[in-house]
Amino acid sequence: MSLTQVQYFSDLIVKVAKDRDRAAFIELFDHFAPRLKGYLMKQGADEALAEEVAQDVMMTLWRKADLFDPKKSNASTWLFRVARNRRIDRIRRQKSAALDPEDPSLQPTPLPDIAEEMDARLRENRVRAALSQLPEEQRNVVRLAFFAGQSHSEIAEHTGLPLGTVKSRIRLAFGRLRQLLETDSSVDVD
């Protein structure tokens, strides 16, 4: 393509952008649509897809010609870039459409069993009640370990207690919790 042709096609896009010039659009369409289709087929698109994407690119030219900046690129570079991007978009959509609807990760989570939910709530309330009966120093280390997710070392550092003391308090707290929960007939401890 000669320099005058490059400028000519760029000027036609500017006419489409400014004046919605149909004659300029038809000339651009006649020149670029078959070339875009050929380019897309060389990139691996079948004839139907190449035709569809080329049509889409030309419609984009009509609707968004004002986005073309002749100072940044020429007409063919701009149109072929749009074609390339549209083809990539189609490939991505095809890949996402190929998801297996039977894939377990795409299935809704089954609703919880109401009886199990009620039992879990009852257990949770009883455990909270049992925790409230522990001495403050044991309750604090249990909360840091199981509700804040801290390791024994982190608890020792956080509280300033020796590591052995932290471990002893947790062990004593577990023993006391077990006693409290085992004597509670409303809690099924497994």
Image: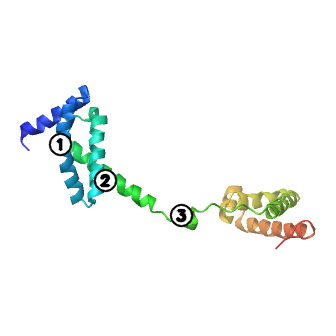
Q: Residue furthest bottom?
A: 190
- Examine the image and state in which quarter residue 165 appears: bottom right
Disc 2 target residue? 87
Q: Residues within 10 Å of mark 1 (few under 14, many from 20)?
A: few
Residue 101 numbered mark, or none: 3
Q: Residues within 10 Å of mark 2 (few under 14, many from 20)?
A: many
- Of the two numbered discs 2 and 3 on the same chain, state the one appearing first in sequence: 2
Residue located at (26% from left, 58% from top): 47
Kindly identify the amino acid type of the residue bearing the numbered disc 2.
Answer: Arg
Q: Are marks 3 and 1 in contact (CB under 8 Å)?
A: no
Disc 1 target residue? 30
- 11 over 129 or under it: above or below: above
User: How far apart are labels 2 and 1 at the CA level?
Assistant: 20 Å
- Examine the image and state in which quarter residue 151 appears: bottom right
| Closest to the observer, 103 or 190 | 103
Q: In this rendering, would 154 be left or right of 66?
A: right
Kindly identify the amino acid type of the residue bearing the numbered disc 1.
Answer: Asp
The C terminus is located in which quarter? bottom right
Which percent across, then down, holds residue 184?
A: 92, 66
Which percent across, then down, holds residue 77?
A: 19, 44
- Of the two numbered discs 2 and 1 on the same chain, state the one appearing first in sequence: 1
Secondary structure of the residue carrying tag 2 is helix
